[in-house]
Image (cartoon, rainbow, N blue to C red):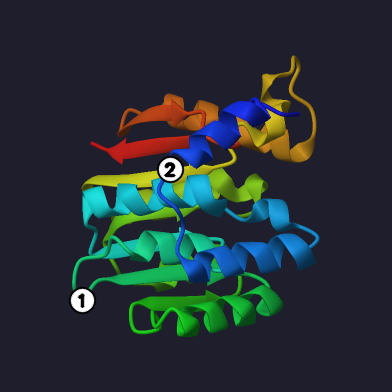
């Protein structure tokens, strides 16, 4: 389902600062060759991630779901000097590509890639998070949220992607495993008095969550 009029999206992208040459190359290669290229954050959302990170100036970022490394590179642009971004990718093939992209961007010193199951890796990283980006398997969104929230600094932010899930959460009743999981996550956050949140209708939906 097209949730955003394609003309409106094209107009929005036209008036969004351009992505850099490396990010453009990553996007073009992914769109041309990867069967799940829709998972890439892309120009419009990527610039939003970058500017949000620059506003927050985080020292520690966690990303759950690396894919090609596009969003990690966008988020890393806002890190404080000496800051680190930890990103977790389940699949080795995508992880290897992301590592090469980090190398090409000369960002290997500030981006740390973890390969494996995020449910096991998150508790092993001893950090206090300023910013967390959740963009992985939808059925575990609540689990990821509950794992990271205790280690968020007060006033830190969680950003969850795909919270509209292709418009499937708008149906009554919600059907499909992933749509149900995303709808349950949205409800879970809305009832959590530890946080405040705003739902952003950019691309496939983003939930911006602030720990009180």
Name the disc covering residue 200, or none.
none
Q: Secondary structure at mark 2?
A: loop
| Residue at the (62%, 56%) spot, across then down | 40
| Residue at the (49%, 68%) spot, across then down | 21
Q: Answer yes or no: is residue 146 visible.
A: no
Q: In x, y percent, where is residue 12? A: 50, 34
- The residue closer to the viewer here, 9 or 54, is 9
Q: Residues within 10 Å of mark 2 (few under 14, many from 20)?
A: some
User: In the rendered view, does 187 fall on the left or right side of 28?
Assistant: left
Q: In x, y percent, where is residue 198? A: 39, 28
Res 95 → quadrant: bottom right
Q: Answer yes or no: is residue 12 visible.
A: yes
- The residue closer to the viewer here, 206 or 184, is 206
Q: Secondary structure at mark 1?
A: loop
- Residue on which disc 2 sits: 16
Res 175 → quadrant: top right
User: In the rendered view, does 52 fall on the left or right side of 203?
Assistant: left
Q: In x, y percent, where is residue 79? A: 26, 65
Please say if 109 is above or below 20.
Answer: below
Q: CB atoms at circles 2 and 1 under 8 Å apart? A: no
- The residue closer to the viewer here, 130 or 144, is 130
Please say if 109 is above or below 138.
Answer: below
| Residue at the (76%, 17%) spot, across then down | 173
- Residue on which disc 1 sits: 82
Please say if 140 is above or below 180.
Answer: below
Assign the N terminus to one quadrant of the image. Answer: top right
> For the residues marked 2 and 1, what is the alpha-carbon distance in whole angstroms?
28 Å
Assign the C terminus to one quadrant of the image. Answer: top left
User: In the rendered view, does 94 fall on the left or right side of 33?
Assistant: left
User: In the rendered view, does 110 fall on the left or right side of 138?
Assistant: left
Outermost residue, top side: 172
Please say if 112 is above or below 180.
Answer: below
């Amino acid at each position: 389902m097209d949730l955003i009029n394609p003309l409106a999206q094209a107009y929005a992208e036209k008036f969004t600062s351009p992505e850099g040459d490396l990010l453009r190359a990553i996007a073009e290669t992914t769109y041309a060759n990867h069967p799940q290229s829709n998972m890439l954050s892309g120009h419009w959302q990527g610039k939003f991630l970058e500017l949000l990170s620059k506003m927050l100036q985080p020292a520690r970022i966690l990303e759950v779901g690396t894919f090609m490394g596009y969003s990690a590179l966008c988020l890393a642009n806002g890190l404080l000097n000496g800051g680190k971004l930890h990103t977790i990718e389940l699949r080795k093939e995508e992880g290897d590509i992301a590592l090469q992209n980090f190398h090409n961007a000369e960002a290997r010193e500030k981006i740390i890639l973890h390969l494996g199951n995020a449910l096991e890796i998150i508790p092993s990283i001893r950090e206090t998070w300023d910013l967390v980006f959740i963009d992985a398997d939808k059925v575990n969104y609540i689990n990821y949220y509950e794992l990271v929230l205790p280690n968020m600094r007060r006033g830190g932010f969680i950003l969850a992607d795909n919270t509209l899930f292709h418009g499937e959460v708008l149906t009554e009743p919600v059907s499909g495993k992933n749509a149900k999981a995303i709808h349950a996550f949205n409800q879970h956050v809305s009832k959590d008095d530890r946080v405040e949140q705003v739902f952003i209708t950019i691309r496939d939906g983003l939930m911006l969550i602030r720990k009180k």
